[in-house]
Amino acid sequence: MGNWVVNHWFSVLVLAVWLGLNIFLFVYAYLKYAKGDKYYYTREILGSTLACARASAFCLNFNSMLILLPMCRNLLSFLRGTCSFCSRTMRKQLDHNLTFHKLVAYMICLHTAIHIIAHLFNFDRYSRSRRATDGSLASILSNLSHHEKDGGSWLNPIHSPNMTVEYVTFTSIAGLTGVIMTIALVLMVTSATEFIRRNYFEVFWYTHHFFIVYILGLGIHGIGGIVRGQTEESMNESHPHKCAEAFQKWDDPDSYCRHPQFEGNPAESWKWILAPVVLYIFERILRFYRSQQKVVITKVVMHPSRVLELQMNKCGFRMEVGQYIFVNCPSISLLEWHPFTLTSAPEEDFFSIHIRAAGDWTEKLIKAFEQQHSPFPRIEVDGPFGTVSEDVFQYEVAMLVGAGIGVTPFASILKSIWHKFRHADHNLKTQKAGHAVLNFDRATDILTGLKQKTFFGRPMWDNEFSSIATAHPKSVVGVFLCGPRTLARSLQKCCHRYSSLDPRKVQFYFNKENF
């Protein structure tokens, strides 16, 4: 139980820090706009929704800064390599990159909703104060756009009583980019549901690239400076605490109070997202360069159940066990890239993948290789990228669990273990590998090619864990899964249940593949 508790609480700590930063930024921005003298007059028109809109904008900037980082696969592979001597707890956090990406996306959606609702109230109040004829401070401030038009010192973006909210929304930079960004976000989020990803991957793939529209819109969203505050010079001359109540005398030449002067806030979003965007562009350039390197298909094998095996070579390609690549077939689609786990071992003179028919793209790819013999359709490859399975040889005992096509990450591991034992690799910590995966009626295993075949059916997990804990009472056991969430929950509970409270005794570390 000890290691599970450490891993769990470290993940909770990371999550708490992220949530804490969100709360801090929200409260900081809220108080700045709710209490700051610079925005005293702006609050006279908008009330508390000004602070709500700006606080949510701060959090949107922060999370938009983070959203691309978990998708920088080369960066994660680099960090995994540099953290090879770090504790397992530290390295395991890198395996939660997709989960963190989703959490950040949910937070962006939450603050987008707050931001939009707050601005709906804001524009309604702008409109009502612009049409007001009661001589109130809000109406006087709203009419500054008329009196001070030449100087540009306006506070209300609705410059005429006849100007509608819809007109301002679709003719201002902030309004138009806000609408476009919201549409892009809705399309990305709705197409990222598990049902769409599983059954209509192409829809998910293409709509998710609307992130480019979202990022560009965010970068220029604040250029118009719709949210305005009193200038420093004007505050020194006519501080709102002295002059707000004397607003009816602002036009009096003998009054010490003058019409306040306003300025728009400078655009800030681009400062938040600049570094991550540059890093991501660098990532995409590197991926493009690697994808253009020639791939030679050395062997094609059609296995039962329409599983296609491709064996390939590529200049300079180096892999580790459990890694994956992205594959593109230009004759099918120029833009679609799909992830596949490498099933070959690093010791082999080729790299291979196994592809199961599971969607339009894979169906077309399998048909292309079934119908066309050499020369085969051109394949482009990007990667390899690191996964949790790279750590398998850091454990004395490894339990490998795969479901369906999820057996593929472990084919590479089992082959590599065979090669290491064959060549008496003394650096290999692993002394036992247990596996429970799908079996075919063949003389050798369909994936590993070994005579030691994989086993049929779902094991009794309590029996499996109990027997391993008994056989290895002082070992660190790595449990690796590539399979559904329901199975992941069962295995995680078993890892927790059968790990000893004494750190010197048996410890089970749960690791799950995520793509």
Image (cartoon, rainbow, N blue to C red):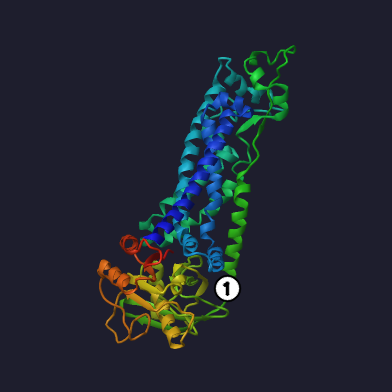
**Three-letter residue code for mark 1:** Gln
Q: Where residue 411 sits: x, y (%)?
A: 39, 77
Please identify the quadrant where the N terminus is shown.
bottom left
Q: Is residue 147 above or below residue 121?
A: above
- Viewed as shown, does residue 1 lie left or right of 224? left
Q: Would you say residue 327 is visible in this rendering?
A: yes
Q: Where residue 240 sits: x, y (%)?
A: 65, 21
| Residue neighbourhood size for the residue with mark 1, other residues' Cα within 10 Å, grouped as few (<14), some (14–19), many (≥20) | few
SS of the residue under disc 1 = loop
Please identify the quadrant where the C terminus is shown.
bottom left
Taking depth in this image into account, of 448 and 397 the one nearest to the observer is 397
User: Could you tell me which residue is drawn at 57 percent across and 80 percent down?
Assistant: 315
Q: Where residue 341 sits: x, y (%)?
A: 43, 72
Q: What is the number of callouts on the image? A: 1
- Viewed as shown, does residue 90 lie left or right of 357? right
Residue 243, image quadrant: top right
Taking depth in this image into account, of 396 and 188 the one nearest to the observer is 396
Q: Would you say residue 356 is visible in this rendering?
A: no
- Residue tagged 1: 292
Q: Is residue 311 above or below residue 156?
A: below
Q: Residue furthest right?
A: 254
Residue 486, image quadrant: bottom left
User: Could you tell me which residue is drawn at 37 percent across and 80 percent down?
Assistant: 447
User: Could you tell me which residue is drawn at 37 percent across and 77 percent down?
Assistant: 433
Q: Where residue 211 sits: x, y (%)?
A: 52, 53
User: Could you tell me which residue is drawn at 49 percent across and 75 percent down?
Assistant: 320
Taking depth in this image into account, of 503 and 175 the one nearest to the observer is 503
